[in-house]
Image (spheres, coloured by chain):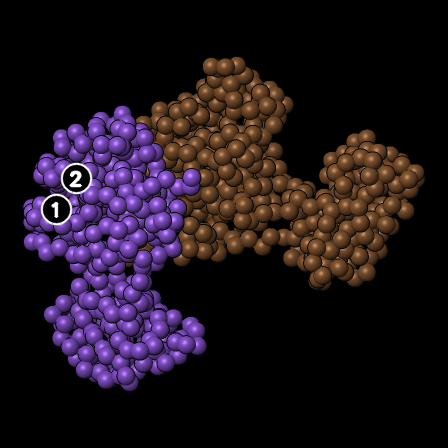
Chain colours: A brown, B purple
Amino acid sequence: MDLETLSALSIPSTSKIVMFVIDGLGGLPFEDGGMTELERAKTPNLDALARHSICGMIDLVAPGITPGSGPGHLALFGYDPLKYQIGRGVLEALGIDLELDPRDVAARGNFCTIDDKGLITDRRAGRISTDKCRELCLLLEKIELEGTELFVRPVKEHRFVVVFRGEDLRDELTESDPQQIGHPPLRVEPRIPEASRTARIVNSFIDQGRSLLAESRPANMVLLRGFSRHPRLPTLPRLFGIRAAAIATYPMYRGLAKLVGMEVLPTGPDISDEFKALTENFKGYDFFYLHTKRTDSLGEDGDFEGKVKGIEEVDGYIPSLLALNPEVVVVTGDHSTPAALKSHSWHPVPLLIYSKWCRPDSVKEFSEKACTAGALGRLPAVQILPLALANALRLTKFGA
Amino acid sequence: MDLETLSALSIPSTSKIVMFVIDGLGGLPFEDGGMTELERAKTPNLDALARHSICGMIDLVAPGITPGSGPGHLALFGYDPLKYQIGRGVLEALGIDLELDPRDVAARGNFCTIDDKGLITDRRAGRISTDKCRELCLLLEKIELEGTELFVRPVKEHRFVVVFRGEDLRDELTESDPQQIGHPPLRVEPRIPEASRTARIVNSFIDQGRSLLAESRPANMVLLRGFSRHPRLPTLPRLFGIRAAAIATYPMYRGLAKLVGMEVLPTGPDISDEFKALTENFKGYDFFYLHTKRTDSLGEDGDFEGKVKGIEEVDGYIPSLLALNPEVVVVTGDHSTPAALKSHSWHPVPLLIYSKWCRPDSVKEFSEKACTAGALGRLPAVQILPLALANALRLTKFGA
C-alpha cells in the first residue's frame, strides 16, 4: 500500500513506537553448519522479547539485493526504496551533517590524478589524507560561479562533497567520473534541456578546479558523480500525525531520519548515551528511531567474535528500553553485514515486533534460524511501518 | 497475476469449488501466552480436513491493514482490493439489498443536528431510532429533482442511503459531511467539470431536505458522503466460465457476491439453512461462496467464549459440506475479529485449501499457529482464487 493511501487510514493515538535498528545485524556462519553471529551471541533479553513478539525475516530492497544504508533505512521507515531513491550526492552531504536547501544540487567528489595528456591515472589520488583533502576543499570553495553559491566539504581521504546552491539548478546531469583509468574526465552534459545552465556551471567549477589543482599532484583533478537534490519525501509527521525522533551517532543516519521528518535528538557517542537520550526524551515523541552502528563496523572488519560481543552488548540495553513501556517495539537491522563477507550483504534480517496486540508466534529466540519460522514469514521491510502503526492502534480499517 | 491474464488460462471442467468464509475467523489470545478463539475451539472436523489440505495465513489487503468487509471479500473473490475499490454509498446500498442500476449514484447519509447558525452540533442526531429514520426517509423521498429519480432508504439509527438515478450522473463529488462538529455542512462540489450537473442535483436535495427537516430536531439536517457508482467489475462467470452462487444471510455479503457475478441463492437465517441451500443447489453451480456471520458478531461483542462456541458450531457443519464431495474446499475468513479488540483487525487469517491435488503439508489442526507453518506460508488473499481454480483443474499452463 502506498504511503498516501496508508496515511488516509491514520488515526490519533497516544501509543509510542520504538524502532531499534541494529546496523548490519544479520550474519553468516564462518563454516558450513556453523552459527551466525546472532545465533552465537548470548541474547537472553532479545530472546525473551521474541517469545512475546511476532517475528520474521525482512528483505530491505528485494531478495538478492544488497541494500546500501540509504535504501535500507528508507525501507525501514516505510518508504519503497525503489520508488524513493536518494542520490549519492545528497547521501554524502547528509553523511557529513551538511544541511541541504531545496535549491541545492549536491554531488560526490573524488580528488584524482591525471597525467600530462589529461588521462586519469588514479581515481583516488593515492588516497590523500583527510587533512590534505580539507585543505584542497578550502581552495576549491574559493571558485566563483555565475549566480551560484558553492560549498566544498571534505569527507574522508580523497572523498568530498560539493553543493551548488542557486535558483533553477537541476540535477539531470551526466557524471564526470568515467569510473576507469586511462580515460579523461568527462564533460558534464545536461540530460534534459532545462539542465543546460546547471551543466555549464558545474563544468566551470571543474575547469577552474583543474587550474587551481594543477600543482597539487597527485590530487590534481576532480571527478564528480551522483548529482542530486533533496528528495522532499512526504514526512512521517505529516503522513501519520506522529512526532518522530531519531537517536543516532553517525551523521548519515541522522540525515536520513531528517529526510523523513524526524527530529534529531542530541546524544553522546556511545550506545549508553543513546539509551539515555531515549529515556530523557521518551515523553516528547510518539515514534523513536534508535540506531546502533558498532555491529556493522565489526562485521565490515571481518571480526566475527567482535560482532558476537557487540550484539551481546546491545542485548544488555533491551531491559532499559522495555522499562519505558512503549506500546510497540520493533527490533531489526538495515541490512546484513556478515563478518565472513566483510561487507553489507543481501541476506534477509531478523525482525521482531512486540506489542500487546501482536499475536505472538512460536519463535523462542531472536536469530536468523528462529525468525525464519516466525508468523510474519519473509516480508519486505516496507511492511514494518504499517504493522508497527497497526500494533499501536494508529490505523483505522480500509474500506467499509 | 491480473484477472484478465488469469482468465486467459481458464479451461472447462466439471469440478466444483466451495469457498466457506467464516466471518471474523482470526482472533487473539486474551492473555499473553494464551490461545486464540480458534485455537481454543474444539474443531475436530476442520482439524481433520486441515490434515488433508494445504494451509497458510492470508493478508486480505496487506500486512498491518485492517480490512473492511468489502475489500476483504473482494480479495477472497480474487479481486485486488486496492485496484477495485467500492464506494461507501454503493456498499451501504448493497447492505440493505437495494439493487443498483448502472445509472445510479449512491451515497451514505447521516441525519445530523445543526444549531440556529447552521453549525453541526451532533453528526448522528443523537442516534435517532431506526423507526424515526424510516419516517424521515419517506419524507425526503418526496423531494423532486430535475430529471432524477430518488430513493432514500433507512439503514439503522441515523444512517440512510440515498440513490440518485438518471442519465449522465457522475460520482466525482466532494462530500457534504465535514466529519467534525462546530462546522456547517459543506456544499457538494464537482471534482471534474462533467460532474457539475450532478453536484447541483445533490445540493438541491440537501437544500430541500434542510427545509423539510427544519422542525424535526434533533434530526434537522442531512450529511452525505461516499458518492459512488456500481463498480462494474469483471464477473467470475465471464472470466472463468463458472456458474457461481452465493449463500449468505446478510445483505452486504449478498451484494458483494452479486458485484462479481454470483447468483444469490435463497436461504433461511441460520447456518443450518445455509448448508441446506448448499446441498439443494449443489448440482446447479460450479463455485459456491458460503458465508457465516455469527463468529464476527461475537468477536465484535468481545465475547471470547461465545466466539469459541460459534466456531465449534461451524465445525459441526463441515461433514455435511464434505458429504457433497466438492473437488475443492477453501475455508478461511474475510478478516480477523479478535474478541480482545472487539473489532475487525489487521491480523492474518488461517486458510486451508483441500483437493485431491493440493499436496498436503504437515499442518495437523486448523488454527492460527498451525497454519502459520503451512506450505502456503503467509500470502495475499487474492492468490486464493487462482489456487482454487488450479486445484479444480480449471487452469491451463501459462506460456508454452
Mark 1 Cα shell of 10 Å, populated few (<14), some (14-19), many (≥20): some
Q: Sequence-wise, which precedes: disc 1 or disc 2?
A: 1
Image spot of residue A253 (x, y percent): 59, 40
The circle on residue B282 is: 1
| Residue A174: percent from left, percent from top | 72, 50
Camera-side residue of B140 and A394: B140
Q: Position of residue B213 (x, y in %)?
A: 21, 80
Quarter of the image with the C terminus of chain B is top left
Identify residue type, mark 1: Phe
Visible in this render: residue B125?
yes
Chain of the residue that carries numbered disc 2 in the rendered image: B
Q: Is B79 situated left or right of A67 in this image?
A: left
Q: Nearer the viewer, residue B293 or B180?
A: B293
Q: Name the secondary structure under disc 2.
A: loop
On the image, the x and y values in percent for residue A218 come to 87, 34
- At x 24% / y 57%, what residue is drawn? B261
Name the residue tied to disc 2: B326
State which quadrant residue A265 falls in: top right
